Image: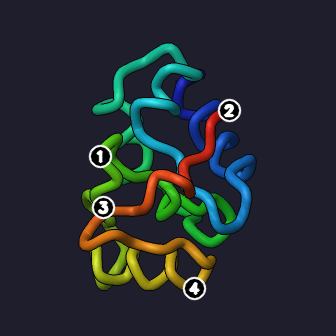
Amino acid sequence: MKDMHQAIQLLKKIPKGKVATYKEMARICKTSPRAIGRIMAGNDHPKEYPCYKVVASSGELTGYSAPGGVAKKRKLLQADGVEFVGSRVDKKYFHHF
C-alpha cells in the first residue's frame, strides 16, 4: 500500500508538458515498473492524479484504462504540449525525480 500511495502522489509532481516512465517511478517507489502499471490502472481519480503522464522507458504509450485508451492518452499529452516522434514521446519531455 505504501508503494501505491507514493506512486499516486508522484503523479502530481510531474510538470505540465513532461512525462515520467514506469521505470523511473518504480525506482523512486522501490518497486517494479509492472507494479507501477497496476497502480496506474487502479487510479480512480485520473483528473486529480494524471496517470496519463506515465509512459514506457522507450517513450511508447502503453495501456490507459480510461475510455478512449491509448489514443486518449496521446491526445491528453499533446494538449499538455508533449510532442511525439512517430508513436513515441520525444525523450526531451522525460521528467526525472
Counting from the top left corner in percent of width and height, residue 21 is at 45, 42
Which mark lies nearer to you, 1 or 3? 1
The residue at the point 54 percent across, 24 percent down is: 3
Q: Is residue 36 left or right of residue 86?
A: right
The quadrant holding residue 16 is: bottom right
Q: Which mark is residue 14?
A: none
Tell me the amino acid under the disc marked 1.
Ser
Q: Observer-nearest residue: 68 or 88? A: 88
Question: Which residue is disc 2 drawn over?
Answer: 97
Tell me the amino acid under the disc marked 4.
Ala
* Sequence-wise first label, 3 or 2: 3
Q: Observer-nearest residue: 44 or 35? A: 35
Question: Which residue is disc 1 drawn over?
Answer: 58
Question: Which residue is disc 3 drawn over?
Answer: 61
Badge 3 crowding class, 10 Å Cα cut-off, few under 14, some 14 to 19, many 20 or more, is: many
Which mark lies nearer to you, 2 or 1? 1
Which mark lies nearer to you, 1 or 4? 1
Question: Which residue is disc 4 drawn over?
Answer: 79
The residue at the point 54 percent across, 49 percent down is: 94
The residue at the point 30 percent across, 61 percent down is: 61
Tell me the amino acid under the disc marked 3.
Leu
- Distance Cα–Cα, label 3 vs label 4: 15 Å
